Amino acid sequence: MRRRPLAHATFTLGAAITLALVAVAGLSLLYTPADPLTMSITGRLQGPSGGHPFGTDQFGRDILSRVMAGAVTSIAVGVIAVGIGAGLGVLLGLLSGYVGGWLDETLMRLVDAVQGFPAILSALLFTAVFAPGTGVSMVAIGIAFVPVFARLTRGSVLELREREFVVAARALGARDRRLLLRHILPNTLAPLVVQATTSFPVAILAEAALAYLGLGTQPPHPSWGLMLKEAQNFLGMNPWFAVFPGGAIATAVLGLNLLGDGLRDLLDPKTA
Amino acid sequence: MRRYAARRAAALVATLFFVSALVFVVVRILPGDPAALIMGTEGSREASDRLRESMGLNRPLPVQYVEWLARALRGDLGRSIQYDLPVGELIASRLPVTLPLALMAAAFMVVAAVPLGLYAATRHRRAGDYATMILSQIGISVPQFWAGLLLILLFSVTLGWVRSGGFEGWSSGVGAALRSLLLPAIALGLFQAAVLVRATRSAVLDVLREDYVRTARAKGLSELRVVGRHTLRNALIPIITVAGIQLGQLLAGAIVLESVFALPGLGRLALGAITARDLPVVQGVALFIASTIVVINFAVDLVYTVLDPRIRYE
């Protein structure tokens, strides 16, 4: 860590912004300056003021409270989407790399195919069949993450399975399951943690984009992307309406990106 | 090389088969009846049955899949329920918006990112490097559609220089059409440019550490020649790979930007089809975009091995 003061600074700044994001989300579950769903016909589209530091939206709802509550949606989608992507991807990667042969070839072609479906495309397809909502966002974004986790795990398994400690464990009679779960998987964790951290901000961006398109979180639930969609119709009347939710997305993503970069420097020096 | 290309081509066919199967599975096999979905709540049971019959939904699923795939291979993606036109024709009619948008964004990405990445690498750990990295970090953090909204706010609402959206069509002149696509292309390319800046910087930094660069400097070549001739050419391989992969992502990103700027492209076609429960169009657009991304990724792979023959032998 002493060798990389900049990496350190990146990690520290990223961690600070991420902690602030989590704290705001946690706080919004207990307290928001106003109810994020309560409308006020007389207080519509106001600019920032003492009563409403971020102003109000087209229904007179407090934008600060909605931005705070939107953090919960973003974090929830991020955690679950990365969980889906990492869970499925690691499973596919372990199987593919360890078993090899035709199964490896088939699974890798499937992974190549899934790579053709960015989150927006998967969400389009799912929304054609299911009602749009936060759940669709989580699954669509999660599926889009599968290829990167699968490839990363497969690569690590291919490298590790010929290493001496794995060969030794096999020679001592360890079974495949034990070899994979006790000896190989723990050694792939560092790059996987880095990948999960760098995937998180991508998930937040994708969630916002899906909500903006009407394929994700639905009104009246607060989501930063949805707020931007609503703000677009009132850009001329209250530009602040579009500035704060977008600023929230950018700050959250910036913090998580910095955290990911910092973690990569600290945990995975090969790729730094 | 020919054998390698043949092997990759076989892999591409297998991947495209999986792409088609995934599209089919989501629309046909997941819970939900396409006929009931299309008819909505107002459709009678008899009408749904008739539609199911006419769409061939009564036959076994593998048969439906093979028939659908065979038709798709002949370019027949079905008929739009909303427009009563062939889906292929509808997709072709929207491509003159989506394709130039993605290509303009790609051009912006390369023109902005490669010089900036090169500059940052040659100023490694100095002010110019840090400033470029901060810029790229911001570019990666800003959602494309928010960048679009901010560009509208500045250039349309505040300055009144351009319209806030819409597409005048190529028939109204190339200049007017390109002007309608300029802001969306910049907003779309911003994120990808930021990614490419980082990739270019790290690729150039890697090459700058090579012995032959030290030799080039030692024999007294100018810095411009060292960077332009010896470094950039060798750093181009990873740069082209990242740029190629970003090209596929631009196609998907165009769906969002078309909504922000009210452009009548593929994305808006698909979004409109969802509202109208026009399943053949959603299926057709998804198949088209996913297949295009997969083909681009394979092409990038092939270009990579042409540029760097070592890959083939690994």
Image (cartoon, rainbow, N blue to C red):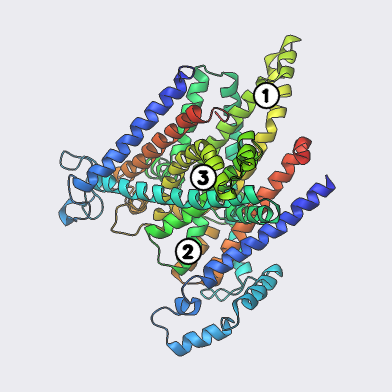
Residue A2 vertical position relative to residue A145 in the rendered view, above or below:
above
Residue A93 placement (x, y as % from top left): 58, 49
Give neighbour class at mark 2: few <14, some 14-19, many 20+ (Cα, 10 Å): many
Residue A29 placement (x, y as % from top left): 23, 48
What is the C-alpha distance between the residues marked 3 and 2?
24 Å
**Residue type (three-letter) at the residue carrying disc 3:** Leu
- Considering every residue shown, the one lying at the far bottom of the view is B46
State left or right for residue A272 relative to residue A258. right
Residue B307 placement (x, y as % from top left): 76, 37
Residue occupying the point 15% across, 54% down: A42
Q: Are marks 3 and 2 in contact (CB under 8 Å)?
A: no
The residue to which callout 2 is attached is: A126
Quarter occupied by residue B9: bottom right
State left or right for residue A135 relative to residue B61. left
Q: Please say whether residue B253 is visible from this viewpoint.
A: no
The label on residue B207 is: 1
**Residue type (three-letter) at the residue carrying disc 1:** Val
Disc 3, SS: helix
Asked whether the residues under marks 1 and 3 belong to the same chain, the reply is: yes
Give neighbour class at mark 3: few <14, some 14-19, many 20+ (Cα, 10 Å): many
Q: Nearer the viewer, mark 3 or mark 2?
A: 2
Subunit ID for the residue under disc 1: B
The label on residue B266 is: none
Residue occupying the point 62% across, 23% down: B205
**Residue type (three-letter) at the residue carrying disc 2:** Phe
What is the C-alpha distance between the residues marked 1 and 2?
44 Å
Q: Quadrant of the C terminus of chain A?
A: top right
The residue to which callout 3 is attached is: B188
Subunit ID for the residue under disc 3: B
Q: Are marks 1 and 3 in contact (CB under 8 Å)?
A: no
Give neighbour class at mark 1: few <14, some 14-19, many 20+ (Cα, 10 Å): some
Asked whether the residues under marks 1 and 2 belong to the same chain, the reply is: no
